[in-house]
Image (tube, rainbow, N blue to C red):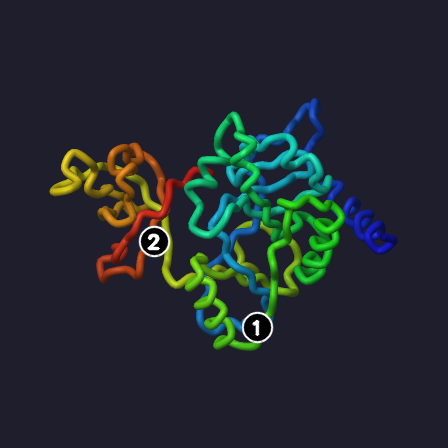
Amino acid sequence: MARLGRTLAALALAWAAWLPCPAGADTPPTTAPAMLLAEVYAAGVDVTQYWISEKFDGVRAQWDGSALRFRGGGIVPAPPWFTADFPAVPLDGELWIARDRFDTLSGTVRKLEPVAAEWRQVHYLVFELPGAAGDFSDRIRQMQLLIEEAAVPWLKVVEQSRVADHAALKHRLNTVVRNGGEGLMLHRADAPYITGRSDALLKLKPWQDAEAVVVGHVPGKGKYRGMTGALQMEMADGKRFRIGSGLSDALRRQPPPIGTRITYRYQDLTKNGLPRFPRYQRVREDL
């Protein structure tokens, strides 16, 4: 307990300047919280220098010590009991239910009037301590102490481990994907806490993903007559393509409105710079 007390005291000092203004202050936070964003893994990386964890297909959220916020800065409408016993220091993590349950999760955490029974399924998986001192290995130990002391069943630290070489990393990736996971995250063990996009954090998946804006709805044919057959998409460079795969019947009946930004998966790019085998993944709701 003495060790935990010293750890908490050190964290409090490190975070004092980071914490947002208390309720009633003149300048409450109104912008998106600063977060570390991942680069894409590339061959040649020395994987022995990284901690490895599963990439969870959830909703990114940051606990600022008193409120839980989406990546865009808005307050997550969680039931008060969900965060009542969270540590009074910043945490960064992912709201998550289970593999392949993103749509259920998204519907749960975005309801303005939270449904307690639905929130009982949700976990907050912590993978970073915003503003904390030390390298990432140090922060892993700090996270473990904090979460252990909080003793909140749905508040968990993301499991981190090391690999010996690329073959072991590939085996780990194949195991996660075979069991329904999305991929892996690699976080440099010696990295201080930073924000913005950085190769201190890498994402590794068996496919690529990107975002584009819906600019039209292509009418369906055959069994999809009367519904949407595909989404007409526009990339940031103005190139257009269609997405027909991955759309549920519900989405075909009520497709994302024109102007909606969505995330899609694809295999690679054609010689014309268009995504090959694009597949709808989800609406980008955290902007």
**Would you name the residue on which mark 2 appears?**
265
- Is 199 situated left or right of 129 in this image? left
Residue furthest to the left: 222
**Would you name the residue on which mark 1 appears?**
163
Pick whichever, 249 or 50, lies toward us.
249
Query: Which residue appears at 27% of the width and 45% of the height?
Result: 238
Picture disc at residue 53: none
Residue 30, percent from left and from top: 58, 30
Q: Residues within 10 Å of mark 1 (few under 14, many from 20)?
A: some
Query: Which residue appears at 52% of the width and 36% of the height?
Result: 118
- Is 13 situated left or right of 91 in this image? right
- Report the amino acid beneath label 1: Val
Residue furthest to the front: 117
Which of disc 2 and disc 1 is earlier in sequence? 1
- Report the amino acid beneath label 2: Arg
- Is 9 situated left or right of 202 in this image? right
Quadrant of the rendered image containing residue 182 = bottom left
